[in-house]
Image: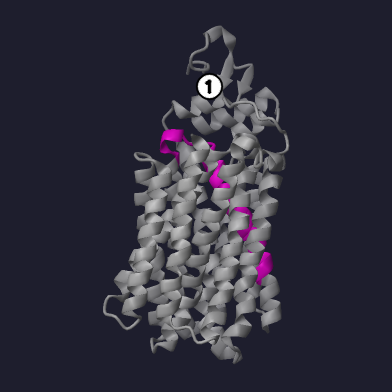
Amino acid sequence: MQTATAPGLPDASHTLDVRAFINQRALSRNQWILVLLCFLIVAVDGMDVAIMGFVAPSIIQDWQISRLAFGLVMGAAPMGLAVGALLAGPSSDWWGRRKVLIGSVLVFGLCTLFTAWTRNTTEMAVLRFLTGLGLGAAMPNTTTLLSEYVPERRRAFLVAAMFTGFNLGSALVGFVAAALIPRFGWQSVLVLGGVLPLVLLPLLLVYLPESARFLVVRGTETAKVAGVLSRMCGASLQGVVKFVSGESEVKSRQPMAVLFLPEYRLRTLTLWVTYFMGLLVIYLTTSWLPTMMRDAGMSIDRAANVTAMFQLGGTVGALVVGWLMGRLNPNRVIAGAYVLGAVALVVMGLNGLNSLWVVAFVVAVGFFLSGAQTGLNGFAPSCYPTLARATGVSWMLGVGRLGSILGSSIGGVLMTMGWGFEGIFIALAVPAILAGGAILLNRRAGE
């Protein structure tokens, strides 16, 4: 193989622009393996995030507790997710994506497994909070690591494709719950949700790389960067004596400070608002829809199966939104999906749970809202430089997780206050529209 040199520079320079190098090459086998590993991490993450929504009706019945009391458990994981995301980004930007990512998978796998043997809501809430710490650290690091190893022209679609793992994992746990709970009880679902991430760990230890762009920004020795990048991209880099990141200089070396520099401030705030509003809607829907359906007379397995269709709709929506983002203005694509999701919420609320079209309505809501949220995950890494990319993405996720906490907890409160299915879902259209408006405002930051 020929020695790689930076595009536009003479061969004698022996300087390689890592960003341009990755952008100009086709994906290698190891890059595709990275896509698959990130997909699997996000899939088990999705399973463990959504798992309580599917086992909640059985636990409430088994322990003879109120929905309001169980709201503590439902809100614990999103709170842990928020804290985990806020801590993971700066940690990853200092210590590396690989270490933080592997540690996060270990944490949420073990804690989900231990949750199967809890005896009351306090124990369960504590373990769900700890589970959330791991879950919150995993998501921004898979997004950041993958975005730094794929060509920018394919980034939106590949990150969206990776995030279909989250939707598929969330849907799979619904079907698993429907099959396992009647035969083995709700504990069996938690055991499976804990074992799968632990099975994935050996593969991550062997195949998961560190980000070459992170290594360059952190001033890692040339030989180590060359080894990592050469292995990932399948090219000989023996003649390279210097690597550069191909990015403009950032005025601050502190990742957190970068988020609030004048050129990034509007991007940061609008991403936070959009993610907050989107997660509020999604978490209230997925956390409490099975319980609402059970109250409407559906069996537990039927309620779990119908709710799982939300995630299947979101899987297709993520691919469509990601594909459109590569061809149209990404801000407008994401905003349009949020607004259409709001319309679908109103239509579902007006028709009710007993409608013959309830499955189609659930799929439509998942398609637009989950598709928009996944598109936002693919869009966010492009808003920040390598120095602060993990921090920017993780703080969007962390601050946005406050919306998931609110959505997970407020569902039980609204139902206790007498709010019906129609009122709750029509009201959810408001934050969906606000999310669309915020991401449109984000477009100004790039002008």
Position of residue 377 in the picture relative to residue 83 (left or right): left
Residue furthest bottom in the image: 64
Q: Position of residue 124 (x, y in %)?
A: 66, 77
Q: What residue lies at 71% left-to-right and 40% top-to-bottom?
A: 257
Label count reads 1
- State yes or no: residue 138 in magenta: yes
Q: Position of residue 293 (x, y in %)?
A: 41, 82
Q: Position of residue 89 (x, y in %)?
A: 66, 47
Residue 429 in view (yes/no): yes
SS assignment at label 1: loop
| Image quarter of residue 371 | bottom left
Count neighbours of disc 1 (C-alpha within 10 A) and say few if under 14, some if 14 to 19, many if 20 or more: some
Secondary structure predominantly adopted by residues drawn in magenta: helix
Q: Where 367 sits versus 299, above or below? A: above
In the image, 218 versus 370, the foreground residue is 370
- State yes or no: residue 166 in magenta: no
Residue 315 in view (yes/no): no
In the image, 379 versus 416, the foreground residue is 416
Q: In this figure, which residue is indicated by the disc labeled 1? A: 236
Q: What residue lies at 52% left-to-right and 49% top-to-bottom?
A: 38
In the image, 139 versus 103, the foreground residue is 139
Position of residue 8 in the picture relative to residue 100 (left or right): left
| Image quarter of residue 74 | bottom right
Q: What residue lies at 61% left-to-right and 59% top-to-bottom?
A: 135
Q: Magenta stretch: give its range.
A: 128-155
Q: Amino acid at mark 1?
A: Ser
Q: Position of residue 77 (x, y in %)?
A: 62, 68
Q: What residue lies at 49% left-to-right and 60% top-to-bottom?
A: 278
Position of residue 131 in the picture relative to residue 315 (left or right): right
Coloration mode:
one colour
